[in-house]
Amino acid sequence: MKTRPVKAAALAAVVAFALVIPAGSQVPPPPPAGPPPPPIVRVFLDWPGGDIEFFKAEIPFVEFVPGQEEAQVRVVIAPQGPPGAGPITISFFGLKEFEGENNTLTYSSAPGDKPEDVRRGIAGLVKLGLLRYAGKTPAAKDLSVRFLDQAKPTSVVDKYDFWVFSLSANAFLMGETQFEEGMYYGSFSANRVTPELKVRTSVSGNFSKSKFDFGEGEVYESRSHGYGFSGLVVKSLGEHWSAGAFLSAQSSTYSNLKLSLTAAPAVEFDLFPYSESTKRQLRILYRLGFTRARYNEETIYFKTSESLLQGALSCAYEVVRPWGRASLTLEGSHYFHDFAKNRLELEASVEFRVWRGLSFEIDGGYARIRDQIALSAGGATYEEILLRQRELSTGYSYSFSVGLNFSFGSTRSNVVNPRFGNGGRSISISM
Amino acid sequence: MRKPLASTACLVLSLILGLSVAARPLPAQEGQAGIDELKKTALRVFLDCDYCDIEYIKTEITFVNYVRDRLEAQVHVLITTQATGGGGREYTLAFIGQNDCRDLADTQKYFSSKTDTEDDVRRGLVKALKLGLMSYVGRTPIACRIAVDYTRPDAAGPGRDRWDSWVFSLSGSGYFSGQATYMSRMVDASFSANRVTPASKLRFGFSVDSSKRRYEIEEEVITGTRSSWDASGLFVKSLGEHWSAGVFVEAESSLYSNVDLGLSAAPAVEYNVFPYSQSTRRQLRLLYTLAVKPVKYREETVYAKTRETLFQESLAATLDLREKWGTVSVSAEGSHYFHDFSKNRLDVFGIVNLRLYKGLSVFVLYGRSWIRDQLALLGREPTFEEQILRLRELPMNSNYFISVGFQFTFGSIFTNVINPRFGSSGGGGMGIHID
């Protein structure tokens, strides 16, 4: 039987293997002698009297062949009416491996079009129609499709004026002989997002309970709930500035809040234009929050309700590039009635590809906490602490994770083999 | 005047603008108003992908209109993924024509590699999406404003694969979190070597993980620890489009399960009702396994054993469907030991997510296990901390979970707009992703 030394030896062998192999894999493989030209789609253009040479020049990503026998696609161009007038039908017929992949496009010339305009227009549609076949050949990586203009995303006919309403409800129950848990969640949202104005509102509620049976009649049950409203209105002020307000109403047993109402006007500056947001952003947001809070239990500061004014400044940097992605968020806040009641949070995340096959990711966060004004004076029970059902007094919190991934070997392993499953099923649900 | 139904192209535009002469390409002076008119008749697309960077796609592909309901769309793009032998993913983009494009369907593929970054993957997907959409865009007037660029590749063709399809991967990760009275630490490491070809599949893997939680309650310190390691291998031979045969081998150790060393060798045979080549969209697999398992326990079990050799057989059935109306994944697995047929278990699992009607979708998630084969249970009573922190397997007859939910969305069907101001939170909607 195998024992621990075997495992240690295996691990050592794995590490040694990992160290030896990459040195070798850095050497590029010698190019094989006389490589065949990359296969591109062979097209038979069936257009009696058509100018084939023009098409060859306009559409370089396929090879035009003279007969149907060697072609993979047959393109038939025929006028619907008498020659020189009316729309022209362009039919695509897939042959051989593209059998069954057919399409029909129609070109309509406008009165007064010159013959070369018509020819160029037809070639443009033939080009688009052939892309589906080219996408299935190695030539796909050398093709790019561009839209020549900028169109407004709101140029649509929309009778709801961009309002979207959504109602959802979920329940989750689980149990085993000695443990049971139930969670219920419901929400309604109404959103309207246009480039000029963003409006998001939602009401939601949740309830959960869990039950432990320790045997001999000893049962521990716990319940918690939360509900709230949140709203956001943002007005766009050019490519770099925005102004708006956050609104919220919240109740939570975890945070000892019976009801907390907040209104927070805010202003944001993005160092980069907002239109580049999927590639990079550096956003600085200042918000001033007015809060009226009522507590479930008297707090450690002997309050059952109070009014608060809080200032918060946050700075978020995000970048997504071919080498990976990075994000960094720094946020500081304080209450105006006592500047010593403050909090500073830093969060960072980096995914970086060091070299082909080697990548690492780091996520981390640290918070310096001096503003737990809602803590209950009564404290929490032993079970509430272990099950993390109550906010506890702390001066800091942190989390940090690091991952390293190194792969080497065949680069032509695009094979999918679903037999016996793909190493376990994972199911993720996002809401 | 004759007005053709499809693709009146810039003609429509010229009529709207009242111009006497229209030509392709669009003259620059017609300007922004002309483009916005073209956009109103642009292709309506329903993008059905739970794990794509949707915002990026919408900022890169602006010559179509995105709608939030599949029935409104002229093309439903259903994107499914499967793992490839190299640890990357195969993205299958099924273009399903609807309404006036019902006659047109296509499939494009994009392959990512394991170490591709998020940006590599989203750019690759956008390219495949653009190529596939062009057959449909060609039917809309905006087609006259699309350009296609082609850079002639260098002569070098693909070389020989000197790794013979073997792919090796080494990974490790750690997670640490805490505050004044609580600390948690988890670390794991794994190594894998795989060779996947259409004819056979070989997988070897080794992984270790360990976790620790520490609580401080009124001067008292409570710590909970879990640790385990696992080594496994799989060989599968393909026998046509419906049958496969192979063998699983495994060695494992787990504190939670009270197993010091458990070995297993299990020949198996599988039948797929659908051809394996359709696996990204539909599978109904039946797997029969016969296992021999020598086990050594950490502590004496409730059956007063410290080691034993077990023979077990099991049968599993899995149905996975990913269609334009939703997702269905249902599985059932039953097994028993040969030395005592009453030592058996049955697990069922199902998830169904349906897009029932315009804007309405429902889901049900259900799992239930009937367990009568806990041979490794501790002989002694677990401590209070072991129970509440779930550090040890506890005796049970059954466990279950169920989740149901619905979502109803109405209002504007268009989802073209990206507005990143004050952060992009909660796009709404629900996605279920099965790998």
Image: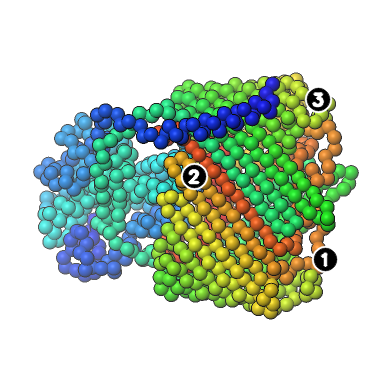
Density class for disc 2 (Cα within 10 Å; few <14, some 14-19, many ≥20) is many
Mark 2 or mark 1, whichever is nearer to me: 2
SS state under label 1:
loop
Q: Provide residue B214's location: percent of width, then percent of height.
A: 75, 50
Amino acid beneath label 1: Gly
Query: Between B33 and A158, which is closer to the camera in this rendering?
Result: B33
Q: Which mark is residue A378?
A: 1
Q: What's the residue at 59%, 55% (across, down)?
A: A364
Q: What's the residue at 22%, 65% (across, down)?
A: B28
The residue under label 3 is B305
3D distance between C-alphas at marks 2 and 1: 48 Å
SS state under label 3:
loop
Q: Which image quadrant for residue A398? A: bottom right
Apparent side of residue A288 relative to residue B140 in the rendered image (left or right): right
Apparent side of residue A421 relative to residue A395 in the rendered image (left or right): left
Position above or below: B256 against A10: below
Lower position in the chain sequence, tag 2 or tag 1: 2
Q: Which mark is residue A126?
A: none
Q: Chain of mark 2?
A: A
Q: Chain of mark 1?
A: A
Query: Between A160 and A233, which is closer to the camera in this rendering?
Result: A233
The residue under label 2 is A359
Rendered-image quadrant of the N terminus of chain B: bottom left
